[in-house]
Image (spheres, rainbow, N blue to C red):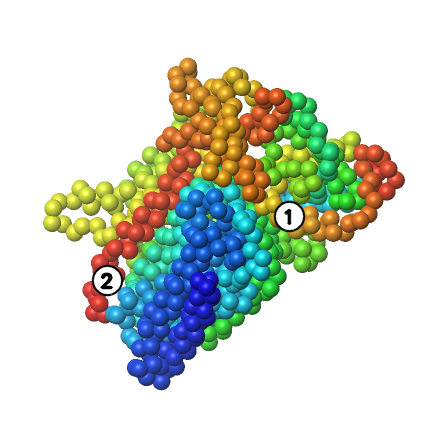
Amino acid sequence: MIPEIGHFALILALALAILQGVLPMIGAHRNNVAMMSTARTAAVGQLVFVIISYACLTWAFLQSDFSVAYVANHSQLALPTMYKVAAVWGGHEGSVLLWILLLVGWTVAVGRYSRSLPDSFVARVISVLGLLSVGFLLFALLTSNPFDRLANPPADGADLNPLLQDPGMAIHPPMLYVGYVGFSVAFAFAIAAMISGKLDREWIRWTRPWTTMAWIFLTCGIALGSWWAYYELGWGGWWFWDPVENASFMPWLIGTALIHSLAVAEKRGLFKSWTLMLAIAAFSLSLLGTFLVRSGIIVSVHAFATDPSRGIFILSFLGIVVLSALLLFAWRAPSLDSDAGFSPNSRETFLLLNNVLLVVATIVVFYGTLAPLLYEVLDIGKISVGAPWFNKVFLLPMLPLVFLIGIGMHTTWRSHKGSLLTTRLLIPAIVSIVLGVLIPGVLYGRFGVMVSVGLIAALWVISTSIIEPLRSWRRAEGAARITPAVLGMSVAHMGVGFFILGVTMVSAFNVETDMAMRAGETVEVADHTFELRELREVQGPNYSAIEGVIDIRKDGDYVAEVRPQKRQYLVQKNWMTEAGIEVHWNKDLFIALGEQLGNDTWSVRIQYKPMIRFIWFGALVMALGGLIAVTDRRYRSTATGAETT
Amino acid sequence: MRPRQQRMLAVGLVVVGVAIATGLTLQAMKDSMMFFVSVTEVSEGKYPDNRNFRVGGLVKDGSVNREEGSLEMTFLVTDLRCDLPVSYTGVLPDLFREGQGVVAHGQLAADGVFIADEILAKHDENYMAPEVADSLAEHVGEQTASLADGSSECSPQ
């Protein structure tokens, strides 16, 4: 009964979504206040029904109602309660429902925090979001109904994929989805602006915190996914250039470009149509990501069970969304641009370069991700584009970008007075070059060109980002304080620096060895000794495992004990590697059990990962920077809001 | 700068950027992209010489062979028509098992043994890499001959 209520609520939500998509749009066109005012109400109503539907599915999981096919395939009686809740989005159907929930949630938030904008504009934004919701609700109801029943319910479920039974994995998808879906606000804004035929500075300012919020969630979501892959997949890598990772990374790159171009559009009224294009691209790439994951056309560790009808539906939806957006763009966007000029020596130029480089980077990732598909379609052969290709090619646009960050932050709008490399930037430049060249040799015993380039880049970005906050802090009481917007920018860029630092050090000084170890044996890797003290059997709630107990010592001093496990989950009979990781701020020691090679001998993978924590720390700092920027007062100002610089 | 110049500058930068990226991409692509070759194609000599490629199929039942206590191992990959001996040293992925789909990265040695430097098995029991599935589908029900046996149809060239 409960699952049927959930199904029915979803249908009602669809009805409201259609209302929300159609009425306000017509109302805005005819200037009919009554019709426009249905927008917010319809969105709230839709949210209520989607919540009911989502709650019903969650209830089915908690009750272990295996007559619901989706529950039977993704849960099990012995599954811990926390993972029963997380299992709701552990498969295809449920994650579509989650996507819808978040989309409608964003819509209601938009309705709530848009009082400063003209009614007709808000009505159009909400209407576009409603139309998107219609698409996803139809997708759920027609191809991926999570409430489908089984005629013969099994006594126990097939269990959640053991890889997903992990706290990091439980929050990774919702984070990522909030980010993906968040870009739909920028998209709806762009469409509404094009339909309205004008683009006020007020409107652009209103969009900025929304875009930044979406970007923050996407940043955290990607970082969480990377962290999870690192410790859970048992390989010790943090990024694999897997198609699905790329699918989340492309909207992130474009979203980053969008944040920067919105700044120019708001402050200077430039790049308006370009900004709209980026807003369309960011959301289209989010949709493309969904298509890649759900259709299974691309080989990926993330590929869920494939169903062609789903792929076709999403592809058609993607086609309709992108095509209509681009047509509207071609028709309306040219009339929106202003003719203000700027000097080549100005912040505008640097933000333009930022945008060009980020877009080139996105094109690189896009090409690498879809090349296998292209080759297959053109019948040239079956290829795979692996990490070496991406690592090489991706660096090309990113390296100049990183060096430009440091200068761009310190230039002024319109026309920068004086030379770009002032004394203010000279000190950071010298410091980063000296340290960048020396650190690898002095601390890690090996000089190298690429390490130094990476380190110089990282230190350059960090040191130039710190200048502004430092000056503000030193300034006398009562003098103009740094605004949250500028502080947020500085912090986010510092995060980029930390990230590059981590990536550089891990790539250069990572040590990885596979070896055969017997209980009682000791090996030495990267100046540490690892003693496999014993191997023993342990029992978990829904798995049994072999656990290795390993003592780590450095120069004879005891460092830590780690306990990597090899688990066998009882229902799916899968073997799973649970790595043992000893974490320090400047290094990780990563130990994973391979398989039994004979009596008491096991294959063991031992890795030394210098400064790998800086990768995720850097991403978190970036997100923190975004968060600080969002709190800036002028985003809360009303229609008459004050100008700030 | 005037708007028109601005636009020209923007377009120019984009074009230059894309051109450089494309050029370098194609350059990098040569040695970094890997072709997937089916076992039968290997037997027919249709594989890239002196460079890495990927080969995939099923791990043949009963073919996994490892010396006790050693990281070195050998097994046969089959596409249900031909078998290819593969040797590998290192830790295997969790889902590596006889009868399951597998993809190996590496090179073919002169003696016809594929020396793998990386072995991939997928995370989901039910999931098989599409190219592996394709290469298997072609030969379901056929007689299997081993490359190592030197039998007629699948003998190494």
User: Considering only vertical position in the picture, is A271 above or below A216?
Assistant: below
Amino acid type, callout 1: Met
Q: Which of the two residues, B67 or A238, is positioned nearer the viewer here? A: B67
Residue A291 location, quadrant = bottom right
Q: Is residue A77 visible?
A: yes
- Image quadrant where one finds the C terminus of chain A: bottom left
Q: Residue at x 53, y 62 (%)?
A: A148
Circle 2 residue: A636
User: How many neighbours does mark 2 have within 10 angstroms: few (below 14), some (14-19), or many (20 or more)?
Assistant: some
Residue A517 x/y as whole percent: 56, 21
Residue A199 location, quadrant = bottom left
Secondary structure at numbered mark 1:
loop
The total number of labels drawn is 2
Q: Chain of mark 2?
A: A
Residue A498 x/y as whole percent: 37, 40
Residue B95 location, quadrant = top right
Amino acid type, callout 2: Arg
Circle 1 residue: B128
Secondary structure at numbered mark 2:
helix
Q: Which of the two residues, A322 or A351, is positioned nearer the viewer here? A: A322
Q: Chain of mark 1?
A: B
Residue A172 x/y as whole percent: 43, 48
Task: Check the image and name the residue furthest to the left.
Answer: A478
User: How many neighbours does mark 1 have within 10 angstroms: few (below 14), some (14-19), or many (20 or more)?
Assistant: many
Q: Which of the two residues, A233 or B87, is positioned nearer the viewer here? A: A233
